Amino acid sequence: MSLRYAIAMLVQKDSLALIGNTPMVRLAGPSKETGCDIFAKCEFANPGASVKDRAALFIVNDAEDRGLLQPGGTIVEGTAGNTGIGLALVANAKGYKTIIVMPETQSREKMDTLRALGAELVTVPAAAYSNPGHFVHTSRRIAEETENAVWANQFDNIANRKAHIVGTAEEIWTQLDGQVDGFTCAAGTGGTIAGVGLGLKAHDENITIALTDPYGAALYNYYAHGELKAEGSSVAEGIGQGRITANLEGAPIDTQFRISDEEGLLWVSRLLAEEGLCLGLSSGINVAGAVALAKELGPGKRIVTILCDTGFRYLSTLYNREWLEAKGLTVFPWLAHNR
Ligand code: PMP
């Protein structure tokens, strides 16, 4: 019996132990197109269906270890949704309450999921980070004003990236038997790219770490030219950062790509139609970045990226003909005749 099979067959001790240890899949289309082996971590397989369950668990455990969370306490967070879903699951399993602040531009499915999980949901208009009404600042204020509450602070709390140093990176290294040439993903908080980057480099500093940035974010220009400057825009949820968060500080970025929504959507559509994977747009952008990295490193290399969350979270947006048309985006052929 292989070690991988043995791990998959283990009976987990509790629901929180279901977070992490996600499967790795070789993506046929992107591999064929580049002559490389392109692998992806299936983060949609986490209980909350996204990569952010990992950060949520580490942030809550860290707050407990530091004595910040008392029994019956409340966890408050500002999030595009996925971290909130992860926190709500972890909080339920540990006996805490959650107050989740989200920009109202995010998908209805994520809001419905949060309400279904029992979180108190607060939505705020989309605003610049410099605006006090921004979802992050709103969540910090609510935490300050709520008794027995902690602010998860995923952007600047490095318990977030630790989840990827000790979890995601170690899993990638083990699953690929240390045969890794490159890793790439986009950044929201930066926890994934920084944590996996640091974790993989600790094993082999020759592994190329590439940032894949959407338009509308400032990190591509920062890593390419040392200037935090955003250009264009993106409809991708959960990614696109305008500043160097504490999680991004010291991230070992060797190279960077900028990927358009159309390029990301093309991979979302191909992965669904050709490989049966239903994903969100950040996953498509990551795969487009992995293809770009494969082309830069040349044939025969082994590249890893992240499938961040499930497409079922975006049925009213990415998989909806009217929404795509309203955004001026290409409609997937099989949706074109749907009402
Ligand atoms: N994709 C999605 C769908 C997300 O919700 C997030 C988290 N905001 C990311 C990617 C980026 O992850 P990280 O915060 O670790 O940079």
Image: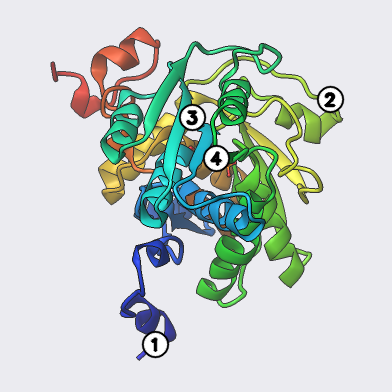
Instruction: Check the image and name the residue furthest to the right.
Output: 226
For disc 3, does the CB lie below 8 Å from ligand 1? Answer: yes
Residue position for label 2? 227
Amino acid carrying label 4: it is: Asn
Expressed as whole percent of the image width and height from the top left, the position of residue 144 reads 62, 29
Q: Residues within 10 Å of mark 4 (few under 14, many from 20)?
A: some
Residue 153 vertical position relative to residue 29 in the rendered view, above or below: above
> Element under label 4?
loop
Amino acid carrying label 3: it is: Ala
> Element under label 3?
loop
Say which mark, if any, is on residue 80. Answer: 3
Judged by depth in the image, the label closer to the viewer, 2 or 4, is 4
Expressed as whole percent of the image width and height from the top left, the position of residue 253 reads 76, 47
Residue position for label 4? 148
Residue position for label 1? 2
Image quadrant holding the N terminus, namely: bottom left
Mark earlier in primary sequence (2, 3): 3
Q: CA distance from mark 2 to mark 4?
A: 40 Å
Q: Residues within 10 Å of mark 1 (few under 14, many from 20)?
A: few
Q: Is residue 278 visible?
A: yes
Q: Nearer the viewer, residue 1 or 118?
A: 118
